[in-house]
Image (spheres, coloured by chain):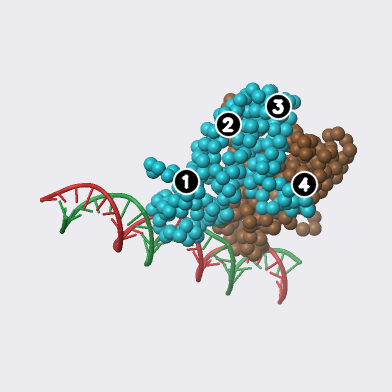
Chain colours: A cyan, B brown, C green, D red
Amino acid sequence: MLLAENQEDAAQDLALDKILRAAEVEFAEKGFDGAGMKALAERAGVSQSLLHYHFGSKDKLYQAVIRQRSKLINDARLLRLRVIDLTEPSALDRIIEALFIPALGPEGGGKAYARIFAGLIAGHARDQALVRECYDPTAKEFLDAVEGALPGANRAIAAQIYQFALGVLASVISRDGRVERLMGNEADKLNDDALIRQLTRFVVGGAKAIADTT
Amino acid sequence: MLLAENQEDAAQDLALDKILRAAEVEFAEKGFDGAGMKALAERAGVSQSLLHYHFGSKDKLYQAVIRQRSKLINDARLLRLRVIDLTEPSALDRIIEALFIPALGPEGGGKAYARIFAGLIAGHARDQALVRECYDPTAKEFLDAVEGALPGANRAIAAQIYQFALGVLASVISRDGRVERLMGNEADKLNDDALIRQLTRFVVGGAKAIADTT
DNA sequence: GAGTATTGACTGATCAATCAGTCAGGATAT
DNA sequence: ATATCCTGACTGATTGATCAGTCAATACTC
């Protein structure tokens, strides 16, 4: 615990981490109810009992996955957010980027956690308290920033923009080729950077449209 | 089945409709895996066997719920979409309204189906084929409309806008007071009409921002 | 430093509960 | 009397969770 706290790449061979990694994938693919402790244990290469030994219950394991990942994402978000000069013209663009990039980058855990995140947006009753705990504090900082960077935005509008932005993010995260399918032949033209640029442009454009005419 | 096809308000006393209504609520609250056939039958006030008698399996029942509701929504959407004059300046606004209003109005089935819809956006493997069947044809008409109404939009951009719009819609649909919580004291100011207006303004603003600079 | 107690990590066997689904037969209307 | 609607009783499989107990390593005692 003293050194080597590199949680991501350097694969900790501790069983506890193997479980967390496997759980993230399993919950992402099947959802909370769809995921099975047996299948999860097999994926992690440990006995099913060990899951309960370390985490107590399925619920607690689920919460542990989300707490860990959301911390990584939020830290990266705040790191980007807090260096933004709110007076410069492109401040809003940088705020939105600070919201999106960590979720889509390596801190976001790739497709795996992305699915879970998209599920959280759907807002089932089970997740409500957890979302409140893990995401609300960071969200409030973003609201402050949006309020400061966007002329004509009060707290209510900032909150709306924030939620809209998360919805757009979720829609992108959980795409399984639907965009490409609907686009037809001109697919594959958007890599991750271009996608983030397009995402940001969309949200910023929408945000300004809301703030202008109210 | 011959007359009285008013599926919504005039409560059909047929068991089949009671099941469909109960299933919509149950699937919305618990998700597909979380919902149980026994609980579902109790909610509908019929025996569990009747579910299998009418629908064969849990999967088929789930599909029936989505097929019925998506048909209502899509019909209402196309009804609005097809009367839009794509040459008038506010065409894009009306297209987006045609996408949103049916999903949030009475045809949309209220909160119940809304949750299911938000879940579909999350895009789990199970739902992929069903989404393709129920929503893709209507989606393509919307893509055509967006492409026609928004100068500078090709098929790829139209598809992006469409998916972003669905994400924004999902984020609004499944909110359980999070916006109000983040807003602070100035809550309750947005009723449904105002929400739709804000939604539309946001998406149209974002769409134009994307189409402009590409 | 040999022997012993204690702890933490881990597993196999097993639990009651719940799951979706089946089936024979009752009810009812035509 | 035939077909449709509907139910209660039931089944095998799977669920999350519990428990007794193994094993290795550390700490403590004399």
Element under disc 4 = helix
Q: Quadrant of the N terminus of chain B?
A: bottom right
Q: Are marks 3 and 1 on the same chain?
A: yes
Sequence-first tag of 3 and 2: 2
Left or right: where does residue C30 sit relative to residue B15? right
- In this rendered view, identify the residue nearer to me: C30 or C24: C24
**Distance from label 3 to label 4 (Cα)?**
28 Å
Q: Quadrant of residue B149?
A: top right
Label of residue A211 in the image: 3
The answer to whether the residues at label 3 and label 4 have Cβ atoms under 8 Å apart is: no
Sequence-first tag of 3 and 1: 1
**Distance from label 3 to label 1 (Cα)?**
40 Å
Q: Quadrant of residue A82?
A: top right
**Distance from label 3 to label 2 (Cα)?**
21 Å
Label of residue B156 in the image: 4
Q: Quadrant of residue B16?
A: bottom right
The answer to whether the residues at label 1 and label 2 have Cβ atoms under 8 Å apart is: no
Specify the amino acid type for callout 4.
Answer: Ala
What is the chain identity of the residue bearing mark 4?
A: B
Element under disc 3 = helix
- In this rendered view, identify the residue nearer to me: C1 or A12: C1
